[in-house]
Amino acid sequence: MTQLILLHEDDNVLVVVAPVEVGDMLTVAGGTVPAREGITVGHKVARHALAAGDKVIKYGAPIGSMIAPAEPGEWVHMHNMKSDYIASHTRAVVGGAA
């Protein structure tokens, strides 16, 4: 069963199309790696190692930047990346208490 798809040949992330469970073998650039965590459909995983500051490329276009490194097959989401385009796309409270 295919769990990950590549949307564009220039992408450095893959999209989850079937639920990933801990230990599932994920096919990424360079081979296969075991999933370290469960990842739900629609989320992204690193296609190859990403460093803090690297642009996240999806659909062949940058969608954000890494704020922490990610190994191949690791979940890429708001805990390790940020949007470069939508300031409100964050978990930080803006303007005081919620």
Image (tube, rainbow, N blue to C red):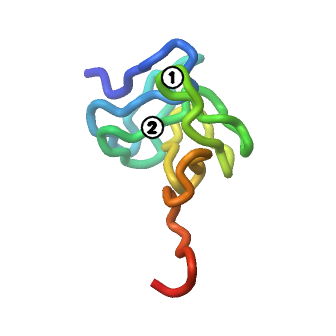
Give above or below for 18 relative to 92: above
Q: Amino acid at mark 2?
A: Lys
- Dot 2: few (<14), some (14–19), or many (≥20) neighbours within 10 Å? many
Q: Residue furthest bottom?
A: 97
Numbered circle sitting on residue 28: 1
In the displayed structure image, the side of residue 3 where residue 48 appears, left or right? right
Whether label 2 touches label 1, CB < 8 Å: no
Q: Quadrant of the C terminus?
A: bottom left
Which mark is first along the chain, 1 or 2?
1
For the residues carrying marks 2 and 1, which lies nearer the camera in this image?
2
In the displayed structure image, the side of residue 55 where residue 16 appears, left or right? left
What is the x, y in percent for residue 47? 55, 27
Marks 2 and 1 sit apart, C-alpha to C-alpha, by 12 Å
Q: Nearer the viewer, residue 98 or 15?
A: 98
Residue drawn at (56%, 57%), measured in percent from left and top?
Answer: 87
Residue drawn at (49%, 48%), measured in percent from left and top?
Answer: 77
Q: SS of the residue at dot 2?
A: strand
In the displayed structure image, the side of residue 80 where residue 38 appears, left or right? left
Q: Which residue is mark 2?
A: 44
What is the x, y in percent for residue 11? 54, 22
What is the x, y in percent for residue 18? 27, 33
